[in-house]
Amino acid sequence: MNKTEPTLERADFTAAFVRILAENGLAEFATEALADRFFALTERLLRVNAVMNLTAITDPHEIILKHYADSLRAAKYLPHGAKVADVGCGAGFPTLPLAVARPDLAITAIDSTDKRIVFVRETAELLGLDNVTAVTARAEDVGAGELRGKYDCVTARAVARLNMLCEFCIPLLRVGGVFLPMKAKSGAEELAEAENAIGTLRAKLRFCEEFTIFDTESAEEPQTRMIAGIEKIGETEKIYPRNFSQIKKKPL
């Protein structure tokens, strides 16, 4: 049985989008013009989600906060014109919000689940986002193949523990590029756990920002988030990334 698609009113969505982004330090994106683009994205997400399990978050205000505002926190760390890989993009977060808000970026969305990649690709086409390429692949495969060392920045959101995630993502970076893992409140603990992985893969932690996301018109408590900047300072040894079973069994 198909799930019921939540009601989406444009005026309410626009007001909530502008307010929530402004409240969360994203005033540069809190415009009615961008709200229109994100309204179209939300319509598409909810329509497809009614027949395909893409996200458990279906309230439009929660989508704005937990998918859009959260994703857009990475924007300030992405240089103009950067080539970005989004590893484990899922239903397109942060790929799609970043592509809408930052058309200067060239984003490659990578996920091993083909139905999600089809959704991201078709959504990008419907929204006229010519800055998105969607690839069905395992991160450890592309990191050992033709995409190795090709990106200025790599993002990853809610994919795996950071000591595993580093091995998936850092090989994709050029030397001098930055890996931007986006984590919940366990982020500081995971950074400590990943210290050996970061060093082994020839990278260095440059910054760690903790912040909260919140909606002043919601009864829900503010939620802690973290984004880190891990710079690749030298060439990663060719033995990395290992295959998935090795990474999972014995993280660096």
Image (tube, grey):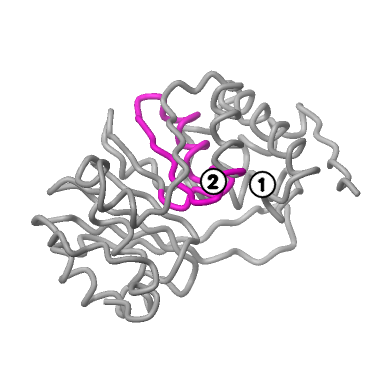
- Whether residue 169 is situated above or below residue 93 in the rendered picture: below
145 in magenta:
no
The quarter holding residue 42 reads top right
Give SS at disc 1.
helix
* Kind of residue indicated by mark 1: Ile
Rendering coords of residue 69 (x, y %): 54, 46
112 in magenta:
yes
| Direction from residue 57 to residue 99 in the image, left or right | left
- Whether residue 190 is situated above or below residue 128 in the rendered picture: below
Sequence-earlier tag: 2 or 1:
1
Using the image as rendered, state which of residue 85 and residue 204 is in the foreground.
Answer: 85
Image quadrant holding the C terminus, namely: bottom left
Instruction: Tell me how far mark 2 sits from mark 1, CA to CA.
Output: 9 Å
Q: Which residue is labeled 1 in the image?
A: 63
Do the numbered discs 2 and 1 sit on residues whose CB atoms are within 8 Å?
no
Using the image as rendered, state which of residue 19 and residue 46 is in the foreground.
Answer: 46
Q: Which residue is labeled 2 in the image?
A: 69
Using the image as rendered, state which of residue 146 and residue 149 is in the foreground.
Answer: 146
**Which residue is at a point 42% across and 53% down the rendered structure image?**
138
**Which residue is at a point 37% across and 75% down the rendered structure image?**
190
Rendering coords of residue 220 (x, y %): 70, 63
**Which residue is at a point 35% across and 61% down the rendered structure image?**
209
The quarter holding residue 38 reads top right
* Kind of residue indicated by mark 2: Ala
Query: What stretch of residues is rendered in magenta?
Result: 87-115
Give SS at disc 2.
helix
